[in-house]
Amino acid sequence: MTSEHAEHPEAGAELFAAAERLEEAQPGLGHALFAAVREAISAIERYPDAWPPLTGWEREPVVRAKGTTRFPFRVIYVVNEGVPVILAYAHERQRPGYWRRRYDGILGR
């Protein structure tokens, strides 16, 4: 399967770090996180506009978030020229909004 999305470089690094921590805590849990994220990304690629814009977000393109199953992580993304661009794999209860600085950089603004 070819990739039908783009990703901020820091997003991938944070996902790997989170999976590594989970894997150290309980073998297999990091792999389960990757599977849950892959499932979320697949849904985003198929239906990129299915999830509502984040509350209070008024800029274009709008930022959306798709949750993962089993884990408190959300895939934060925008759709730029028809392609989902992942800004972050964000834990729902840690560092809210930290990914906002990535918005302009990923879109070349």
Image (cartoon, helix red, strand yellow):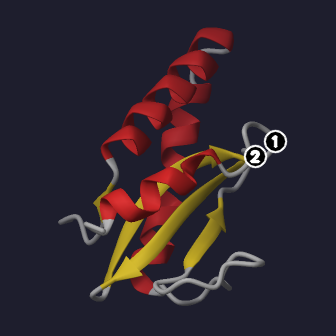
Q: Residue at x 54, y 82 (%)?
A: 62
Image location (x, y in percent) of residue 56: 76, 78
Q: Nearer the viewer, residue 71 or 100?
A: 100
- Alpha carbon of mark 2 to alpha carbon of mark 1: how far? 8 Å
Tag 1's secondary structure? loop
Of the residues tagged 2 and 1, which is closer to the observer? 1
Q: Which disc, if any, is residue 8?
A: none
Q: Give the amino acid type for the residue marked by disc 1 in the picture.
A: Arg
Q: Which residue is mark 2?
A: 72
Query: Which residue corresponds to the image point at 49% horizontal and 24% vertical from the top-left?
Result: 17
Circle 2/circle 1 CB separation < 8 Å = yes
Which residue does the numbered mark 1 point to in the structure image?
93
* Horizontal side of residue 38 vs 109, given as left or right: right
Residue 12: x %, y % from top left: 38, 40
Q: Residue placed farthest to the top in the image?
A: 24
Q: Residues within 10 Å of mark 1 (few under 14, many from 20)?
A: few
